[in-house]
Image (cartoon, rainbow, N blue to C red):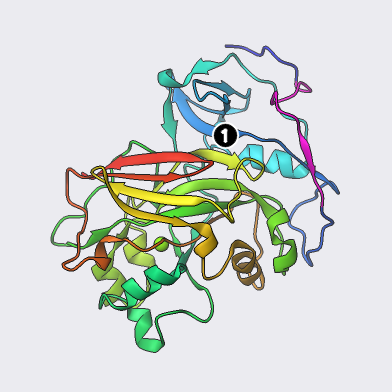
């Protein structure tokens, strides 16, 4: 499986397109070219014959073509490829393609470089169902619909791949584990003080996230970080897609539990859209390539039912987003 293409060979049979946009940030994170080159592509992290790899998934989803990368970069999943593209570097040589059925998918960013940014109550109908559930500590400070984005984070170690088990913490810790289907935004060019009008130029691509949540911890501790960050509580994948391949501002987010549809909504229904989220986050926090923003979940979570329908051992949760793909995780 040694190099079959030169480092200057095209990485995709599809035509590249130039993503224009001047550097409009006050504090550029890394040196970039004036125009960043984007390709329509799906990037997967996976293991094959015991070794970690990063590669491009074929259009027919039957194979994946790994890049010839140092081990340390392969272990970080797609992070290095994102940074190379942002810098405008030549792409690495590719190795022989492998049938997708022969690899074990990892999360595309198995350990994100820092916490996953998340947005609470960002769909109108979900904000109402959550506020009326009795588990929303934030509702005690105001109305059902937030006036500004509610931001929290999940620790990087909570990330797992499609197919890996969501581990129940045990009844002595929590008995109220819930699912949340969400679109994940992947930052490309970083920056601080990014204006909403320019924000989509900083989006490298998208992925699928299940923001698994311990509702009792979310409520009792008056913050959302711990109950969202339990081990295995951030299924992500099955891969990343570039922004060319998916319009994150208008795509459908769905979730099934044991084959029963629970969530089905468009990202057009976000209370705070992706540009607003990037403008808000970057106002005081510098964003970096590979940062992840989970944009919030639609109506239909378990806490919204009366009585609540929490996840149980033996369940299977599937989250699918048009233009990206689906992740499915058993509950252990
Ligand atoms: Mg969420």
Q: Main secondary structure of the magenta part?
A: loop
Please give left or right for residue 327 compared with residue 239 in the image: left
Residue 258 placement (x, y as % from top left): 23, 43
Quarter of the image with the N terminus in it: top right
Residue 252 placement (x, y as % from top left): 48, 51
- Residue shown at 55% from the left, 69% from the top: 272
- Residue shown at 67% from the left, 72% from the top: 283
Query: Residue most toward the left?
Result: 171
Ligand 1 is located in which of the four quadrants? bottom left
- Residue shown at 39% from the left, 88% from the top: 141
> Badge 1: few (under 14), some or many (20 or more) residues near its Cα, within 10 Å?
many
Seen from the viewer's position, the closer of residues 322 and 226 is 322
Query: Residue most toward the bottom?
Result: 141
- Against 300, is 272 above or below? below
Quarter of the image with the C terminus in it: top left
Q: Is residue 10 magenta?
A: yes
Residue holding disc 1: 43
Residue 126 placement (x, y as % from top left): 38, 68
Choose top left, top right, bottom left or bottom right for residue 275. Answer: bottom right
Residue 288 placement (x, y as % from top left): 65, 55
Seen from the viewer's position, the closer of residues 228 and 199 is 199
Seen from the viewer's position, the closer of residues 300 and 289 is 300
Please give left or right for residue 124 compared with residue 185 in the image: left
- Against 145, is 54 above or below? above
- Against 139, is 331 above or below? above
- Residue shown at 18% from the left, 68% from the top: 306
Q: Is residue 269 visible?
A: yes
Choose top left, top right, bottom left or bottom right for residue 300. Answer: bottom left
Magenta-drawn segment: 7-20
Q: Number of labelled discs?
A: 1
> What kind of element bears circle 1?
strand
């Amino acid at each position: 499986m040694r190099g079959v293409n030169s480092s200057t060979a095209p990485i995709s049979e599809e035509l590249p397109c130039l993503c224009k946009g001047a550097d409009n940030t006050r504090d550029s994170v890394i040196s970039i070219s004036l125009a960043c080159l984007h390709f329509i592509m799906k990037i997967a992290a996976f293991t094959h014959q015991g070794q970690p790899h990063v590669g491009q998934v074929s259009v027919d989803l039957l194979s994946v073509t790994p890049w010839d990368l140092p081990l340390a970069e392969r272990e970080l999943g797609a992070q290095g490829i994102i940074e190379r593209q942002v810098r405008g570097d030549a792409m690495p040589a590719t190795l022989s393609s492998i049938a997708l059925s022969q690899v074990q998918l990892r999360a595309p960013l198995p350990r994100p470089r820092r916490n996953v940014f998340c947005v609470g109550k960002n769909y109108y109908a979900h904000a109402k169902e959550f506020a009326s559930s009795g588990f929303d500590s934030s509702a005690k400070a105001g109305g059902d619909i937030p006036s500004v984005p509610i931001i929290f984070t999940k620790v990087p170690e909570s990330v797992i791949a499609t197919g890996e088990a969501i581990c129940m913490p045990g009844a002595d810790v929590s008995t109220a584990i819930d699912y949340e289907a969400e679109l994940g935004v992947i930052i490309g060019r970083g920056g601080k003080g990014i204006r909403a009008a320019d924000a989509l130029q900083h989006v490298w691509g998208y992925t699928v996230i299940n923001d698994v949540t311990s509702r009792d911890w979310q409520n009792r501790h008056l913050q959302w970080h711990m109950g969202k960050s339990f081990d295995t509580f951030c299924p992500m994948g099955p891969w990343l897609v570039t922004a060319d391949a998916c319009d994150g501002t208008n795509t459908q987010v769905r979730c099934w539990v044991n084959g029963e549809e629970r969530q089905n909504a468009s990202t057009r229904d976000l209370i705070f859209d992706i540009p607003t989220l990037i403008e808000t986050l970057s106002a005081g926090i510098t964003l970096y390539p590979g940062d992840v923003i989970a944009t919030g979940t639609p109506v239909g979570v378990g806490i919204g039912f009366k009585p609540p329908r929490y996840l149980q051992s033996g369940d299977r949760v599937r989250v699918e987003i048009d233009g990206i793909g689906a992740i499915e995780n058993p509950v252990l």
